[in-house]
Image: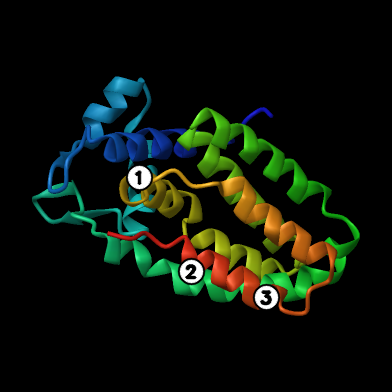
Amino acid sequence: MTPPVVHSLREQIREHILEGIVSGRWQPGERIVERRIAVELEVSQTPVREALRELESLQLIESAPNKGVRVRNLTADDLKESYPVRAGLEQVAAELAAGRLAEDTAALEREVAALREADAAGDGEAQVRHTVAFHREIVRAAGNAVLLHTWESLGVEVWTTLSIRWFSPEPRSHAQDHQELVDAFRRRDPRIGALLKAHVLSCAPRV
């Protein structure tokens, strides 16, 4: 499957900075220089500033007067904080979307198929992309714009990336975990909300 299209320059710059943090290009406590990124990517400083603000709102970086922007020293506990909130939102989404997804799981099945390929290839980037896309489909199927907006504001893709690449080094069958959820939707399992909540909590990073 082709990756989703990145629609804005700000998003491309955000992913560039995020990849730099995840890969260790920028270490915890190290300064990220806005002007240097703009020169490197041949863009103006405005979209770089916007991307940095977004990452700061997710508490991935921090800024201080006269000190600039620096990478936060994140721990597994920091990453785990968003998971109970996300789990609660997805529990509600699953319960609202249960009837619709019981009738049509095609969108979820596409992501599971892509996850099987990613698992087999050991492709961490694809695992993150299709894991997040799977969960977004459930939240979208709930048909509640407020719920979707709140879920997206959590920066699920960012935290999933960090959780998998920093704190989940052991191989995991992402496809199988998600196939079990598809099966639960299909059989109209009355516990679907609780099952999805437990699944999300199980994905929280471990030291």
Front residue (pair 166, 53): 166
Where in the figure is residue 56, as x and y percent of width and height? 31, 55
- Other residues around mark 1 within 10 Å, as few (<14) / some (14–19) / many (≥20): few
Front residue (pair 154, 179): 179
Which residue position holds label 3?
193
User: What's the residue at 29%, 34% (across, down)?
Assistant: 23
Which residue position holds label 1?
169
Where in the figure is residue 198, as x and y percent of width and height? 55, 72
Q: Earlier in the sequence, mark 2 or mark 3?
A: 3
Residue 123 position (above or below residue 133)? above
User: What's the residue at 42%, 67% (across, down)?
Assistant: 82
Q: Secondary structure at mark 2?
A: helix
How far is mark 2 from mark 1, CA to CA?
A: 17 Å
**Image check: 92 left or right of 57?**
right
User: What's the residue at 37%, 50% (across, down)?
Assistant: 168
Which residue position holds label 2?
201
Q: Residue furthest left?
A: 66
Query: Is there a contact, CB below 8 Å, between mark 3 and mark 1?
Result: no
- Other residues around mark 2 within 10 Å, as few (<14) / some (14–19) / many (≥20): some
- In this rendering, does residue 51 appear at all? yes
Front residue (pair 51, 194): 194
User: What's the residue at 69%, 61% (across, down)?
Assistant: 181
**Image check: 60 left or right of 105?**
left
Q: Secondary structure at mark 1?
A: loop
**Image check: 58 left or right of 104?**
left
Q: Quadrant of residue 22?
A: top left
Q: Please state which of the two labelled residues, at mark 2 or mark 1, is closer to the viewer.
A: 1
Where in the figure is residue 39, as x and y percent of width and height? 28, 22
How far is mark 3 from mark 1, CA to CA?
A: 28 Å
Q: Earlier in the sequence, mark 3 or mark 1?
A: 1
Q: Residue furthest right?
A: 103
